[in-house]
Image (cartoon, rainbow, N blue to C red):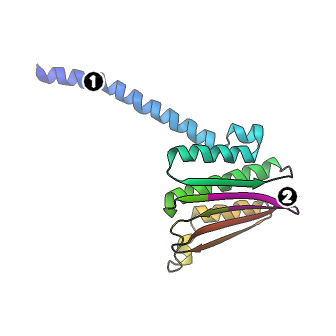
Amino acid sequence: MGVVATDTERDQKEPDLCSGHLDEAVVRLRQVTHNLLPATLERRGVVEAIQDLVVSTKQLHPLKIEFEFELATPLSKEIEIQLYRLAQEGLANCIQHAAATRFYIKLTVNRRILTLQLMDNGIGISNKVPAEAHRGRGIAGFRNRTMMLGGQFTLDSKPGKGTILTFTIPTI
C-alpha cells in the first residue's frame, strides 16, 4: 500500500513539475523574442534600446558596463536594428568568452560616419590559436552585418589585454 501511495504522490507532483517547467519556458521565450527586436528600439530608437540592454544585462551578470553616445544625426531603422544587434552580440560574446569585468560601448557620428566601439578588459584572443578558430559565427556575423551596411569591421585583441571591436558605417 505504501508503493501505491508513493506512485500517487508522484503522479500528483508531475503535473505541477511540468507546469513549472512550462512557465519557465514561456518566460525564457518572452525574453528571447523581446531581445530579437525590443519594443524600445521601435518606439524610442537605438540609444534607449542599448541603454535598456545595459540595464537588463547588469541585473543578470556581474559586469560593469558603460555606454557613451553622441548622435546628432537621425539614423535609418535598418542601421538602428543592426547597431542594436552588434551591441547585443558583442555583449553576449564578452559574457560568454572574455572573462571580463568591464564592458564599454561607444556610439558616435562624425562627418556622416557612424562608429560603434565595443571594448572589454577580458582575456583577449590569443594569436597562438590559428586564425580559422576565430572565424566562428560571432565574428562572421559582425563582418556580415557591417558589410550589409557598407561599413568596415576591425578586431583588435591581445591576450590578457582585452578586445576592441570597431564598426564604421556610413550614415547616408
Determine which residue is flagged by label 2. Answer: 171
Residue 66 position within the rendered picture, expressed as x and y whole percent measured from the top left = 64, 54
**Rendering coords of residue 75 (x, y %):** 83, 50
Q: Position of residue 154 (x, y in %)?
A: 69, 70
- Left or right side of 152 for 156: left
Image height of 75 relative to 28, above or below: below
Q: Please give the name of the residue rendered at 22% of the width and 21% of the height, measured from the top-left corner.
A: 8
Residue depth check, mark 2 versus mark 1: number of the one nearer the observer = 2
Name the residue rendered at 55%, 72% in the picture.
161
Q: Residue at x 71, y 55 (%)?
A: 68
Q: Which element is circle 1 on?
A: helix
Q: Is residue 165 above or below residue 2?
A: below
The residue tagged with tag 2: helix, strand or loop?
Answer: loop
Among the two numbered marks 2 and 1 on one chain, the one whose residue lies closer to the N terminus: 1
| Along the viewing direction, whichever of 17 and 67 lies nearer the viewer | 67
**Which quarter of the figure has residue 163?**
bottom right
Expressed as whole percent of the image width and height from the top left, the position of residue 107 reads: 74, 57
Q: Which residues are magenta?
A: 104-117
Tag 2 near tag 1, CB within 8 Å: no
The residue where tag 1 is placed is 11
**Left or right of 17 on screen, residue 122:** right
Circle 2 packing at 10 Å, graded few (<14), some (14-19), many (20+), is some
Q: Amino acid at mark 1?
A: Asp
Residue 106: say if magenta: yes
Q: How many marks?
A: 2
**Which residue type carries mark 2?**
Thr
